[in-house]
Image (spheres, grey):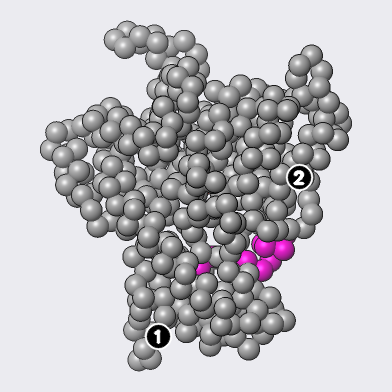
Amino acid sequence: MSSEKKSQPILLCEPFLEGNEWLYLKECLDTKWVSSAGKFVSRFESKIAEYVGVEHAVAAVNGTAALHMALLVAGVEPGDEVVTSTLTFIAPANAIRHAGATPVFIDADPLTWQMDANLAAGFLSERCEKRGGRLYNRNTGRRIGALLPVHILGHPVDMDPLLELARDFELPVVEDACESFGASYKGRNVGAMGDIACFSFNGNKLITCGGGGMIVTGDGDWAARARHLSTQARSEPIEYIHDQVAYNYRLTNIQAALGCAQFEQLDHLIVAKRRIAEAYRRMCRQLPGLTYMPEAPWAECVFWLSTVVVDPGAFGMDSRGLLACLAEKKIEARPMWQPIHRSAAHRGALFVDTGAADHLHSHGLFLPSSCGLTPKDQERVTAAISAAAG
Ligand SMILES: Cc1ncc(COP(=O)(O)O)c(C=O)c1O
């Protein structure tokens, strides 16, 4: 049997569960606090709020639910438009639809891969107008409800120009920080810059609850409303009295127990992601036709998913060819996301497009980025990529 056949698969992004996970889960089972109340839920909320540097955190069942509630709390109404990134996992666009609004997709800045603030500024200033103190899209007549920048891949969005736009146009900012917990922008933590922000603790994220999410905000009323929405809008704790149609979006104690154990390992996990990034960066310097993902001078990136761009001419093979070569060696890679304005799920939505996200979709590949990736595993990935190079 060849050594490749014997070797274990290297997956894209596995959780790293080496702390108190068993201990805290056992405590949940032993005490029977397994559902959506319990000490781990409130502990997890206060740990996240303290770390991000915001006053309030509200746990949610996942990042998509957190985004849905954040949009509602920020005042987005059915029929509104929400300005967001096209180069992202699809969840924020879906959350906008769940709120009854329509996304306006803004292309990526080719230098940072994050939402291009100049394009957003062009859309808001040239295609929208203020009426009665509110901003409307001149063509569709729909109100602009919010700005929803998405910090992708562990790297922050260039927030200052977007925050200035939000001030000028009086729009709330909902940060989608689901992929970028732990990252910072000019010394400010991701999640602490907008009016409200969301994190995901899905199994593939830097820290995980299995599934989980969190809303953070400095506004106590907004936090209270999100909490209310997440618990079926129960307005009285004993009688079954509910004051609106709402959701069952609360995180369980079991999930939060996992999250608390994971949070204790955060520093170590960030070090691991940066070590993996550095090794891939070194590889890219040695292999013509491969470019490692950017880290802007003002960014502290946590490199949630290490990503390379393949120039087929210089590398000798395109990104999908490399994907297939890696798959043959049981190494999992993935193409960057299809820009959401191309997705059948959001067909017909508005977009401001320069082709930057299309380029990254065609040529970008996510590489194995698990915090538990050993130097030996990483050498195996590097060797497989080097062997594929023409
Ligand atoms: C950018 C982004 N936003 C939102 C989400 C949604 O999070 P969840 O999977 O926890 O619902 C994810 C990922 O999973 C994401 O990558």
Residue at 42% x, 38% y: name it. Answer: 52
The numbered disc on residue 43 is none
- Residue hosting label 2: 118
Direction from residue 133 to residue 51 in the image, left or right:
left
Residue at 68% x, 28% y: name it. Answer: 167
- Residue hosting label 1: 4
Q: CA distance from mark 1 to mark 2?
A: 47 Å
Q: Quadrant of the C terminus?
A: bottom right
Residue 352, given in percent of the width and then of the height, sits at 78, 46
Direction from residue 145 to residue 130 in the image, left or right:
right
User: Within 10 angstroms of label 2, few (less than 14), some, or many (20 or more) residues?
Assistant: some
Between 243 and 83, the one nearer to me in the picture: 83
- Determine if residue 90 is in view: no
Q: Could you tell which of marks 1 and 2 lies nearer the N-terminus? A: 1
> Considering the numbered disc 2 on the image, is that residue within a helix, a strand or a loop?
helix
Q: Is residue 256 above or below residue 289?
A: above
Most prominent secondary structure in the magenta stretch?
A: helix
**Which image quadrant for residue 211?**
top left
Residue at 77% x, 45% y: name it. Answer: 119
Q: Is residue 334 above or below residue 132?
A: below
Q: Is residue 334 above or below residue 243?
A: below
Direction from residue 105 to residue 66 in the image, left or right:
left
- Residue placed furthest toward the left: 30
Q: Quadrant of the N terminus?
A: bottom left
Q: Are marks 1 and 2 in contact (CB under 8 Å)?
A: no
Q: Tag 2: residue type? A: Asn
Q: Which tag is nearer the camera, tag 1 or tag 2?
A: 2
Residue span colored magenta: 358-367
Residue at 61% x, 76% y: name it. Answer: 290
